[in-house]
Structures are given as C-alpha cells and as structure tokens.
Image (spheres, rainbow, N blue to C red):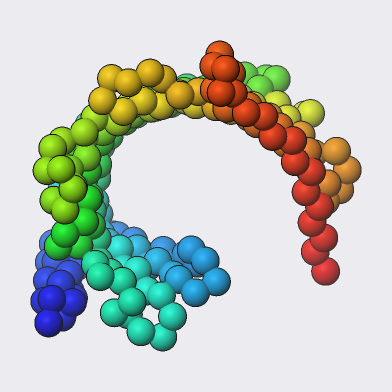
C-alpha cells in the first residue's frame, strides 16, 4: 500500500512538472542506469519554467522481477542553479540540490561550487560540496558532510589525476589520490593512495584490459 501511494504521488508530481513547462521546450529528463546485475535505476523529471535553472523529479529503483524488493523504491529530488558565470575556458557554477529517499530514507540538502577551466595543455575542475544529511530511522540528528576535490587531465598524454578530501561532522579529513594512465590500446594502469599522511595509509595498483569486438 505504501508503494502504491508513493507511485501515485510521483506520477502526480511528474505530471505537474511537465504541464508547467512551456510546450516549445518539453524539458523532459529521462535517464536509465544499470546499477548491478539485478538492479536498475530510472531517473525521471522536468526543468521548470523559472527565471533561474531549476529541475524536479523522481528516481525509481528496481531489483529483479519484483519492485517490492526495495523497501523505499522511490526517491524525490530537486535542483536549483543559484549562480553561473562562463567565459571561454572558464565555467563557474553554484547549485543547491535536495533529495528525499522514500518514506523512511535519507534526506539530503547539498550546496555545490564548481570551477572548470581549460588551457592549451590541460583541463582542470575544482569542486566543493557542503551537505546536510538526516536519517529518520537513524539517530535523528543532522550530520554535515564536506567534500573538496580537484581533477586534472592531460589530453595529449591521456593522463588523469584526481584528489579528494572528505570529512563528516568536523572529524579529520580523509584524503584519496588517484592517477590513471592508458598504456596501450585497451590497457589502463591506475594507482590509488588512501590517507597518505596517516599510518593507516593504503595503496592500490591496478591494470585493466578491455577489448571490443
């Protein structure tokens, strides 16, 4: 019964979003992803006719032939772009995102700043995120999640460098550094270092091979 109510509410929300949009735009958002061998996620939504870019919609999670395999198969989400500034080789955006995972799942409100720029020899992206999570079935206390990341790409050498730092509720930052480098056609070498300044640091070296026919 709860699943039926959620499905009905989601269908009504989607219909409102689509009817509110201008007919000449028809800003339907539809994405289907395979999460694992037996689970899928479908993201449905619409852009709203507002002065600043805004979107709202729902995400459906299915596992196997029975949709009831998930206790809360539907998540509602919304996105609001607060600021954007772009010029050749330089894009800066600030967005506010909210999500509600079913009737008893996690609630999240996140503020994200991103800065992307391109030069003749490399591309780079800087990202900062501050999020507040609330779990009704947990301790019923809001928790603050912080993320800072930087991504460099060297198109000519096909090298990628990624560094991420995260922390929860003002705890110590946890840092991860990763490098990817294609060697030959279909062969890629990657190295990852977790907590590099800690005694508990861990390192991984992987080589992958792929072939398409």
**Residue extending furthest top?**
197
Please identify the quadrant where the C terminus is shown. bottom right
The x and y percentages for residue 78 are: 22, 50
The x and y percentages for residue 116 are: 48, 25
**Residue at 49% of width from left, 74% of height from top?**
38
**Residue extending furthest front?**
199
Say if 75 sits above or below 188 in the image.
Answer: below
In screen coordinates, is 4 left or right of 55? left
In screen coordinates, is 157 left or right of 147? right
Does residue 111 show up?
no
Q: Quadrant of residue 72?
A: bottom left
The x and y percentages for residue 11 are: 17, 74
**Residue at 16% of width from left, 53% of height from top?**
137
In screen coordinates, is 54 left or right of 70? left
Please identify the quadrant where the N terminus is shown. bottom left
**Residue at 78% of width from left, 38% of height from top?**
189
The x and y percentages for residue 30 are: 37, 65
Q: In which quarter of the image is residue 196?
A: top right
Say if 56 sits above or below 5 in the image.
Answer: above
Does residue 172 show up?
yes
Q: Nearer the viewer, residue 115 or 202?
A: 202
Q: Quadrant of residue 132?
A: top left
């Amino acid at each position: 019964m709860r699943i039926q109510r959620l499905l009905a509410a989601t269908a009504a929300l989607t219909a409102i979003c689509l009817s509110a949009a201008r007919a000449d735009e028809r800003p339907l958002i539809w994405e289907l992803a395979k999460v694992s061998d037996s689970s899928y996620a479908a993201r449905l939504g619409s852009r709203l006719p507002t002065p600043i870019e805004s979107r709202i919609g729902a995400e459906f999670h299915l596992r196997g032939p029975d949709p009831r395999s998930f206790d809360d198969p539907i998540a509602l989400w919304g996105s609001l772009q607060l600021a954007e500034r772009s010029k050749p080789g330089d894009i800066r955006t600030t967005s506010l995102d909210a999500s509600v995972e079913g009737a008893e799942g996690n609630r999240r409100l996140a503020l994200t700043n991103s800065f992307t720029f391109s030069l003749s020899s490399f591309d780079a992206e800087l990202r900062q995120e501050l999020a507040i999570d609330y779990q009704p079935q947990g301790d019923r206390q809001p928790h603050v999640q912080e993320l800072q990341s930087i991504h460099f790409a060297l198109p000519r050498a096909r090298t990628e460098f990624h560094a991420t730092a995260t922390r929860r509720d003002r705890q110590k930052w946890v840092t991860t550094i990763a490098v990817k480098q294609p060697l030959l056609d279909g062969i890629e070498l990657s190295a990852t270092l977790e907590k590099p300044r800690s005694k508990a640091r861990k390192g991984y070296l992987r080589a992958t091979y792929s072939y398409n026919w």
